[in-house]
């Protein structure tokens, strides 16, 4: 008799394992004889670093307007300029010496970045291949329109703007120096140069 009862118990156990255990192992997307169900959703994401660098018209003086497009991501025009600095500048300010005139304007640069563990050395570096008539037209950069201006080079880190605070507009100044030149190397007409602003978060 003991053997028969043991066999029946074993059969009941097998039935329980075969019928009920798989039921409890099912996902909880359906349920019977209840008014609630609780399915789960696993959410995955990969967080990446991100950077943006924007330029904008300055806020001091009578700044030259920075607008989108115009052959680059942004464009700016000093309007009519000359090597003597005579006449009213289209925008910004002008000062002159015996050999040239320098037109200057304020502008803003904003570096925004996210996801970096280290950013205390973050900076923006300016470079330019220069104008076609590079011996007559020179671009410079400074903290303010009062200068002193540093000529923007074709390469290197001579002109570097610290940008250690994300999403904070930094007020700076840009200059265009026009040489007072006559003779065969003189030039009048339109010319343009592209400045590259390189943001590095580090």
Image (spheres, grey):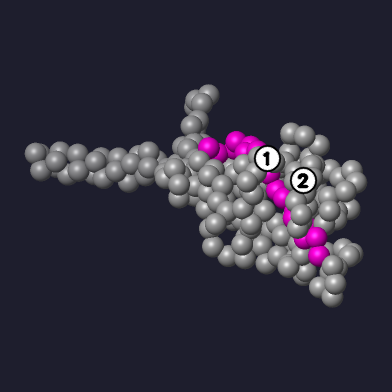
Q: Secondary structure at mark 2?
A: strand
- Above or below, comparing residue 101 to residue 61 in the picture: below
How far across and down, in percent of the image, does residue 175 sit?
72, 50
* Point 54% across, 43% down: residue: 163
Q: Nearer the viewer, mark 1 or mark 2?
A: 2
Q: Position of 56 compared to 45: left or right? A: right
Q: Can residue 19 be seen from the camera position used here? A: no
Labelled disc at residue 136: none
Q: Could you tell me residue 78's position as x and y percent?
A: 83, 50
Query: Could you tell me which quadrant the N terminus lies in?
Result: top left
- Residue 143 lies left or right of residue 16; in this view the side is right
- In the structure shown, which secondary structural element does the residue marked by tag 1 occupy? loop
Residue visible at 51% across and 26% down in the picture: 36
Magenta extent = 165-181
Q: Give the camera-side residue of 112 and 179.
A: 179
Q: Residues within 10 Å of mark 1 (few under 14, many from 20)?
A: few
Q: Name the side, left or right, on which 19 lies relative to 132.
A: left
Q: Which residue is mark 2?
A: 95
**Is 170 included in the stretch rendered in magenta?**
yes
Q: Which residue is mark 1?
A: 146
152 shown above or below 50:
below
Residue closer to the observer: 106 or 97: 97
Q: Kindly report the secondary structure that dominates the magenta region of the rendered protein.
A: strand
Name which residue lies at 44% across and 43% down: 120
The answer to which quarter of the image holds residue 81 is: bottom right
Q: Taking 153 as reference, is 8 left or right?
A: left
Q: Nearer the viewer, residue 148 or 60?
A: 148
Q: Mark 2, residues whose alpha carbon is within 10 Å: few (<14), some, or many (≥20)?
A: some
Could you tell me how far apart the alpha carbons at marks 1 and 2 are, in whole angstroms?
10 Å
Q: How many marks?
A: 2
Residue at the image point whose x is 84% and y is 53% from the top: 84
């Amino acid at each position: 008799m003991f053997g028969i009862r043991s066999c029946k118990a074993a059969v009941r156990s097998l039935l329980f394992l075969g019928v009920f255990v798989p039921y409890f192992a099912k996902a909880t997307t359906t349920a019977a004889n209840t008014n609630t169900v609780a399915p789960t959703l696993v959410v995955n994401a990969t967080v990446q670093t991100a950077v943006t660098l924007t330029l904008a018209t300055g806020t001091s003086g009578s700044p030259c307007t920075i607008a989108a497009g115009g052959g680059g991501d942004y464009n700016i025009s000093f309007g009519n300029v000359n090597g003597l600095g005579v006449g009213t500048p289209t925008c910004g300010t002008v000062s002159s010496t015996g050999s040239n005139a320098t037109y200057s304007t304020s502008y803003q640069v904003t570096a925004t970045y996210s996801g970096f563990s280290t950013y205390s050395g973050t900076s923006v570096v300016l470079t330019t291949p220069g104008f076609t008539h590079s011996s007559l037209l020179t671009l410079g950069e400074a903290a303010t329109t009062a200068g002193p201006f540093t000529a923007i080079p074709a390469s290197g880190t001579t002109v570097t703007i610290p940008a250690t605070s994300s999403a904070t507009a930094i007020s700076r100044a840009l200059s265009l120096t026009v040489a007072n030149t006559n003779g065969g190397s003189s030039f009048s007409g339109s010319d343009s140069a592209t400045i590259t602003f390189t943001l590095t978060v580090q």
